Amino acid sequence: DIQMTQSPSSLSASVGDRVTVTCQANQDISNYLNWYQQKPGKAPKLLIYDASNLRTGVPSRFSGGGSGTHFTFTISSLQPEDIATYYCQQYDNLPPTFGPGTKVDIK
Amino acid sequence: QITLKESGPTLVKPTQTLTLTCTFSGFSLSSSGVGVGWIRQPPGKALEWLTLIYWNDDERYRPSLMSRLTISRDTSKNQVVLTMTNMDPVDTATYYCAHFESITLFGVVAPWYFDYWGQGVLVTVSS
């Protein structure tokens, strides 16, 4: 299985701050990476696919980048409704694997 | 509008078999490139993919759980069923079904992204 790691595991930031989460794969996965947002008690929601493509309807303050083994997820201006845990997920190989998540909250 | 909803028992005893049903609408599981997967999440932990079924009835399983899992579909009812045998307390989790689009990578069809999810059902394994 491809192992995914994320850092940090949690962060606190102020409204309006730029927030960046990193995701690393233990082997080259090209750009075969998705990002999901999960709010407490809710199902995950797809935000970004193919590492950098924003899903239709997702606010443009969310963005993703990277390729190979190192990826980033950025919220350009943190909003109160962005409080959630964010997961990366690779689809280069079966089984699809998720990162451990990064919990984002407001300082 | 695509929707999915999981149903089944919320409490099972150790060694019992779990059967969960995913009832969906807004798409056909006969449409090329479409599939439904099951993903679970133990309380406070990360997401773990379990199994999936493609539009062409092809199935894939998490290798470490393959001997315990079965996925099937009833296209006429718009349902996908997950069966998991020999349940253990470590299987306590919220179980989600999700719609996915597939992609061909290196000549192999793979799940691309899980874009619509059910609300999940918390299954507790306890005697």
Image (cartoon, grey):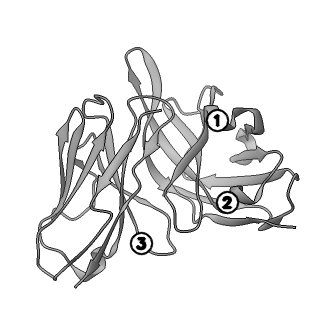
Q: Given the image, what chain letter belongs to the residue carrying mark 2?
A: B
Secondary structure beneath dot 1 equals helix
- Depth-wise, is mark 2 or mark 3 nearer the camera? 3
For the residue carrying disc 2, how many other residues have a C-alpha within 10 Å: few (<14), some (14-19), or many (20+)?
many
Q: Do marks 1 and 2 share a chain?
A: yes
Q: Chain of mark 3?
A: A
Check disc 3 and report the residue beneath it.
A39
Instruction: Identify the residue position indicated by label 2 in the image.
Output: B6
Task: Give the Cα separation between the discs numbered 2 and 3.
Answer: 19 Å
Q: Give the vertical position of A12 relative to A4 (above or below).
A: below
Of the pair B122 and B35, the residue shown nearer to us: B122
Quadrant location of residue A58? Answer: bottom left
In the picture shown, does residue A39 fall above or below A1?
below
Q: Label 1 crowding class (10 Å Cα cut-off): few <14, some 14-19, many 20+?
A: few
The amino acid beneath tag 3 is Lys
Q: CA distance from mark 1 to mark 3?
A: 28 Å
Mark 1 highlights which residue? B64
SS state under label 3: loop
Residue type beneath disc 1: Ser
Residue B53 pos. (x, y %): 62, 35
Q: Is residue A4 left or right of residue B126?
A: left
Looking at the rendered structure, whether the residues under marks 2 and 3 are on a common chain is answered as no
Host chain of mark 1: B
Q: Nearer the viewer, residue A33 or B30?
A: A33
Secondary structure at badge 2 equals: strand
Question: Could you tell me which quadrant the C terminus of chain A lies in?
Answer: bottom left
Along the viewing direction, whichever of A27 and A29 lies nearer the viewer: A27
Q: Is residue B21 above or below residue B105?
A: below
Q: Residue B80 at what x, y percent from top left?
A: 70, 45
Q: Which residue is depicted at the point 45% across and 18% down?
A: B108
